[in-house]
Image: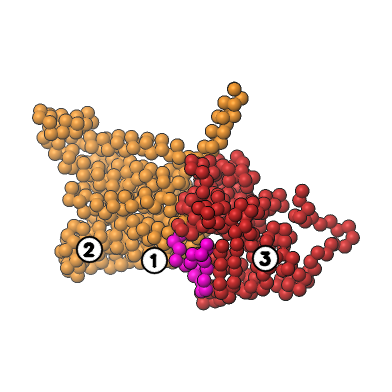
Chain colours: A orange, B red
Amino acid sequence: MVDQSIAGAGAMAAASDGDRSGRARIVILLLCLGLAVAVLLSLTSGASDASAVSVVGDWLLGAAPGNEALSARDRLIVYDIRLPRVILGVLIGAALAVSGAVMQGLFRNPLADPGLIGVSAGSSLGAVAVIVLGATVLAPVTSVLGTLALPLAAFCGGLATTLVLYQVATRHGRTSVATMLLAGIALAALAMALTGILIFMADDRQLRDLTFWQLGSLAGATWQKIGSVGPVIVLALAAMPFLARGLNALALGEATAGHLGIPVQRLKYTAIVGVSAAVGASIAVSGIGFVGIVVPHLLRLAIGPDNRYLLPASALLGACLLLLADAVARTIVAPAELPIGIVTAIAGAPFFLWILLRKRGVVDL
Amino acid sequence: MIEARDVSVAIGGKGIVANVDFDIRPGEIAAIVGPNGSGKTTFLRALSGDLAYSGEVTINGRDLSVMKPVEAAMLRAVLPQATTLSFPFTVREIVRLGLLGGRSGALPGEDERLPERALARVDLDGFAGRFYQELSGGEQQRVQLARVLCQVWAPVLDGKPRYLFLDEPVSSLDIKHQLIIMNIARDFARRGGGVVAILHDLNLTAMYADRIFVMHRGRLAATGSPQDVLSDDLIEKVFDCRLRVGVLPAGDMPFVLPQSAA
């Protein structure tokens, strides 16, 4: 009897050997809690003294009569200034991290990141084109699209870059990392040169707009801005879970993914369009690097590379880290603010170097 | 059954495979042999639906060129020569990918346990928790075979035969595991499936293949049973090597043939 139960326990342990889905679910649950805490802290930290308790109290009581958990002034601060900022941070953090994870799956390479391989530069070019040419050459377009023009142009710029990059770097279903990174450098240089020409053409008012946009932070978050980039990001994020199984199969190579029954071409183009949309919409708000490479990498160490868990976990951790970076950005030089891209680069670039050191000899260049 | 009629494949304007007729019946192991660069792998890739071809290929009577990936995945599984990974998947996670698109054909509720059973069959019991990237080439090859077996676990599904396409399945294996893998292929065929294998070892081929397709410079040089095909003339013509079939080494030179396996 005793022997049987021991043998049974042994068999159970063997059955779950190498299966990290249980751990992944726990990590995702913890990340959900972490994000809730990060959101609450972001909503309650700042010059106003609205406490976490009163914010939660106000939210719970809602429109109930006699709800005095928050003063009218604090309610304005929390709901019209801090909440849009938090939502934008969550959306962009999730979009960048998931885009990184999807792109790494697509290129079969842990070093792919929209910022590193020129996709962000392409998106920036689109955004700058709208800022500089919006009132003249592109006027017919911008007058129709309104506030959607900037995120859409950034999307198109990112999409074009990703498509070119994929064509150049992939031969017979194998993506060469060296080609990918070098082609990314070339494309980024080209996009930056074109951006430079546009900046050169810009007048004083446009230059001011450009500077604000380039130093982008989440400070300018408004409900209107969320209205223009939010739907794009939410749509792109909603499409990503459907890619998870296909991206797992793609880890074995394009041909094998096809043999397993995955429609590879459709998967690739959905992934490219989704990533370009998410990155474009994020760039339309602010240039933020390294989230897409740091977050999926950390999570792969914890829960493994299974995209069914990696993608949602990346969204959650990306959102948490961006809120954290935003908190640092607005407190470290208070009352002024650092651009959030500077914070993520200062933390992310050394981390990226650390990945390279760890992988030296393993990464196939 | 799988039938290929007058199949030609060109890559980048260069003809690699020309006018190959091929067929495999359920219950058979068909071996494709030939020197390096004779078009074996290219032909198998066309048969797998990876490459555009001219001519006609049908699997169980259905035209391969109009099949969706998921439909083909239910009819055949493909073992490539070698698979490298950039992400730290565990062995179990890799084998489980075999259950992704098609239908294993195992009894309901058994799919969860298939990875362990498939690993046991390729002699990798207890490897489920190891990292794929840390295994030797031969072990990786057997992990991939376990994945392929999961995809078509039942050789016959809904009364229709299914197929294994194996590209040099034993090339990086020691002799013990060569025999284990070829026995898995034979078992798959005996239970009603079909196996197409590219092989280099003519002794293994003679031992296991029901029919041999010999390729030479992109064309079919000979077809038939091992007894009919493996002759001194054919080997000299195709492999450009003066070897003689069925001749023992002189004197006390030792030799070890797979056929002697107990």
Label 1 crowd bin: few (<14), some (14–19), many (20+), radius 10 Å = few
* Disc 2 secondary structure class: helix
Cα distance between the residues tagged 2 and 1: 22 Å
* Disc 3 secondary structure class: strand
Q: Position of residue A351 (x, y in %)?
A: 43, 46
Label 3 sits on what residue type?
Ile
Label 2 sits on what residue type?
Val
Residue A364 vs residue B21, the one in the foreground? B21
Q: Residue at x 48, y 59 (%)?
A: B72
Is the C-beta separation of discs 3 and 2 under 8 Å? no
Is A250 situated left or right of B34 in this image? left
Q: Residue at x 44, y 61 (%)?
A: B68
Q: Is residue A52 above or below residue A86?
A: above
Q: Quadrant of residue A347?
A: top left
Cα distance between the residues tagged 3 and 2: 65 Å
The N terminus of chain A lies in quadrant: top right
Query: Which residue was labeled with disc 3?
Result: B212
Q: Is residue B63 magenta?
A: yes
Label 1 sits on what residue type?
Val
Q: Earlier in the sequence, mark 2 or mark 1?
A: 2
Q: Which residues are magenta?
A: B51-69
Query: Which residue was labeled with disc 1?
Result: A164
Is the C-beta separation of discs 1 and 3 under 8 Å? no
